[in-house]
Amino acid sequence: MLGRSLAWSVGSALVLAVAVVAGCSASNGSSFDDDGTAGAGNHSSSPSSGTGFNPTSTGSGTPAANCDAGDDEDRDKDGWTKSQGDCNDCDPNANPGAIEVISSSGPAADEDCDGQVDNVALCDDGLALDDPDAMHAARALDLCKEAIDNQGGVLSAAWVRANGTPYSGPGGVQHGILDGFGPNVKPQLGGRLLVLSSGTARVPGQPGACAGMSCYGNATGSAPPGFPAAVPGCDGSSDIHDDVGLELVLRAPTNANGYKFNFKFYSFEFAEWVCTAYNDQFIALVAPPPMGAQNGNIVFDSKNNPVSVNIAFFDVCDPGTNNDFAAECATTSPSCPAKPNPYCPSGPGELVGTGFDNCFGSNLEDAGATTWLETTAPVHGGDEFTIRFTIWDTGDENLDSTVLVDAFQWLAEGGVDVGTDPLPDPK
């Protein structure tokens, strides 16, 4: 077990969904103000008004009989006319602002009116590791469409710090677009995934990779209001360091009622620094926040623990080397959490080749990771919203953490709530 003063410096699966009727009017967007709160937006239907949007469908994009709407008539009330490109004005799920839905039942259809049936594009092949374009980072998340002509997609993208101010870290190595994370962790969709790190978003051998457990980027940061989020029974620091994030402004497709994405969190804080002041965190901050979010954050476990080494899903580790669970907590508190049982059930395989398996070759610190987790949240069709993926060191700049984010997909099915759950173990 090492003291915190020892630091080193830097030398897609397709959506299976049932089509639903979504809101038919686009709305003005909302962004985060400088203090991290949601700015004013003029939303026709706010996702914070309910736990999910669950209307019933009148069709699946298949042309209906006697659908003889005029060129400038909006018969299905989806906000689009035939002259604007609506290919089926008898089905509100079919228009140029919709997403393509691959249904396990019912006929195949052309919901997005691009002239092709059930085509879902992938767009992240060939993106460079150090690509500085934040719009390309959105593509690494599998968000392929830009929101033009009132269509759903990405309105803007920016590299930011935790509070939403522009990011200008040294060398840009705190973010990266990778084709995997070590030999055993592959993209969840497409050919690339997004990596954000309080150290370096690199694996050993890549340009700019860290040389140990602690590499430094931005110094002291400013957290959004309500963060770092407290863990019950574990007093945490209010200071953050080395923060970095990707902020996206999105417009939901007209037939969407939710979205999901996958993420995976790694940290050198695991296992001895569980329940201490130094629990680095990853959040996905949404404005306007959907019902069920915590201070706007939509990633946490069933006990409302934020994503840190205290989250319930920290299952990727070596039970032999990670034998000091909450050891630092035990030196200062009589009420530290007990070691999970089972402990390290997913084993260390997904640490191999990441730098978190052997402290980037130094073997001076152990580490662990979560399994792949999936977060869902509701949205109304046509709404605009902001989502900020951000990570930071808590308490000091030592013992880095990294998050992988991938497979952002729009949902067109009923009953979408805010929630985070582990994905099935591929083994």
Image (cartoon, rainbow, N blue to C red):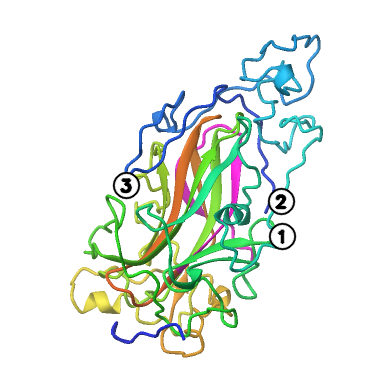
Horizontal and vertical percent for residue 175?
51, 65
> Which residue is pictured at 40% across the width and 53% down the height?
300
Sooner in the amino-acid sequence: mark 1 or mark 3: 3
Q: Relative to 323, is 151 above or below?
A: above
Q: Is residue 410 magenta?
A: yes
**Image quadrant assignment for residue 310:** bottom left
Amino acid at pointer 3? Asp
Q: Is residue 276 left or right of residue 193?
A: left
Residue 9: quadrant of the picture:
bottom left
Tell me where residue 251 appears, x and y as whole percent.
54, 36
Q: Residue at horizontal 21%, vertical 64%? A: 235
Going by the numbered disc 1, the residue's amino acid type is: Asp
Q: Which residues are magenta?
A: 402-427
Image quarter in which the N terminus is found: bottom left
Few, some or many residues within 10 Å of mark 1 (<14, 14–19, 20+): few
> Which label sits on residue 125?
1
Element type at marker 1? loop
Residue 389 is a magenta residue: no
Residue 308 vs residue 187: left or right? left
On screen, 37 above or below 76? below
Of residue 290 and residue 179, the one placed in the foreground of this image is 179
Give the quadrant of the C terminus.
Answer: bottom right
Residue 370 visible (yes or no):
no
Is residue 223 depicted above or below 352 in this figure? above
Residues packed near mark 2 inside 10 Å, few (<14), some (14 to 19) or many (20 plus): some
